[in-house]
Image: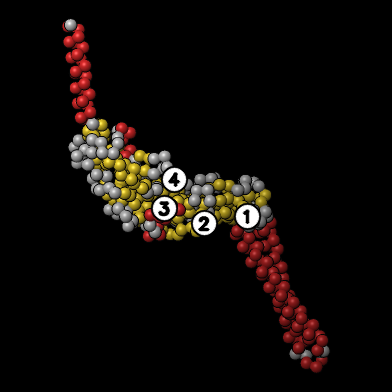
Amino acid sequence: MKYQNIMMFCCLFSAMSTLAEEDKGVTVFVEPAEEVANGTVSSLSCEFMSQSTVVLSAAVDAELTSLLPVGSQVKKNQLVASQDSFYVLNELQKNEIKLEQRRHDLAFHKSEYERRKNQGEHVSLSELQRLKWQVRTSMAEIALAESEIARLSRDSKKAQLRAPGDFEVERHLSKLGQFVSRGEPVAQLSPLSGNEVVCDMPLSFAAHGTYEQASFSYNRKPLTLKRVSNVVNANTQSKRIYLNEPDGLVLDVGQRISVEMMQTSQQKLFRISADALNFDFDGSSYVWAIDDNKSASRVEVNMIQGTSFNARTTVSGALTNGMRLVVRGANMLSDGETVELVNSTL
């Protein structure tokens, strides 16, 4: 009899505990929804890239006698590489000697033409024409020699490959001591200034608003949209946008950065915890909202692509600012169910 009383007491206590738990409801954690006042903020994957690289090419057919190491930073007109200019200078010297001789020939032919012309009727017309032709020939030979000297002088200077601005030697395209032909690439240079931020922007972002009118920033530094590519990447369905180099920040060419893009929107948007999102089999998304009576209700929402970072995302839907959304315990809920808030201060 004693044991039966104990058993009845235990069953009664268990039933009371169960009823108490049922009255208490499902225990959940909640976080508030925050209305976005300025528009959507999307995160773009970007790269700091050279606006245009420069390739220095050989100006003459000659051996490469000097070449700065990769990684060297150079100022405008600083020597990057040089070629053996012996043969060019030798040709230049020979043509200068020829030019001097042609000038002497011209002076002689001119004086001979004037002397014979002053003899009047004692000189035949054909003889005068021959002397005049010699003068013109000498003048043409001088012009050709001057042209060749100008070309060789240019080649002798171009054999000294100099930086067109402030650059860094990115890579070698020929080796020191190699015989390189005219036009053969020697070194590739990357500019140290005037670079730009290049971002791959999904086409779906166009649905948020007009991205040409969006504002961009990196580390709170505003960036200006320079141009938008009309060529779409077939694999990623994105197009490239080009932004200016951020002021006051030092970035390395090739560095990956994350740029924020803010777009205005006609619909109300809310920033919520990513943990508040739930998904159906068809891919649609929803949240569980808790009202003042601690009753749960399902609310359909639409995710705004590309706005998820720092464990929060942007959605649209029938939400209000400060609405309590379940972030933990949602798998136990059903519509209209009463819950118990762990963080009851919200």
The colouring scheme, among rainbow, by chain, secondary structure or one colour, is secondary structure
| Measured Cα–Cα span from mark 3 to mark 4 | 20 Å
Secondary structure type for disc 3: helix
Tell me which residue sits at (34%, 40%) in the image: 277
Instruction: Using the image, determine if residue 27 lies above or below residue 145.
Output: above
Q: In the image, 247: left or right of 293?
A: right
Q: If you read the primary sequence from the N terminus, does the residue marked by circle 4 or circle 1 appear first?
A: 1
Amino acid type of the residue that numbered disc 3 sits on in the rendered structure: Phe
Q: Position of residue 91 (x, y in %)?
A: 69, 61
Amino acid type of the residue that numbered disc 2 sits on in the rendered structure: Val
Instruction: Using the image, determine if residue 276 lies above or below residue 317.
Output: above
Q: If you read the primary sequence from the N terminus, does the residue marked by circle 2 or circle 3 appear first?
A: 3
Depth check, front residue: 330 or 148: 330
Q: Position of residue 81 (x, y in %)?
A: 58, 51
Q: What residue is pinned by disc 3?
A: 205
Amino acid type of the residue that numbered disc 4 sits on in the rendered structure: Arg
Q: What residue is pinned by disc 2?
A: 231
Which of the two discs, 3 and 4, sits closer to the camera?
3
Q: Are marks 2 and 4 in contact (CB under 8 Å)?
A: no
Q: What residue is pinned by disc 4?
A: 256
Q: If you read the primary sequence from the N terminus, does the residue marked by circle 1 or circle 3 appear first?
A: 1
Q: Residues within 10 Å of mark 1 (few under 14, many from 20)?
A: many
Tell me which residue sits at (73%, 82%) in the image: 111
Depth check, front residue: 21 or 97: 21
Q: Are marks 2 and 1 in contact (CB under 8 Å)?
A: no
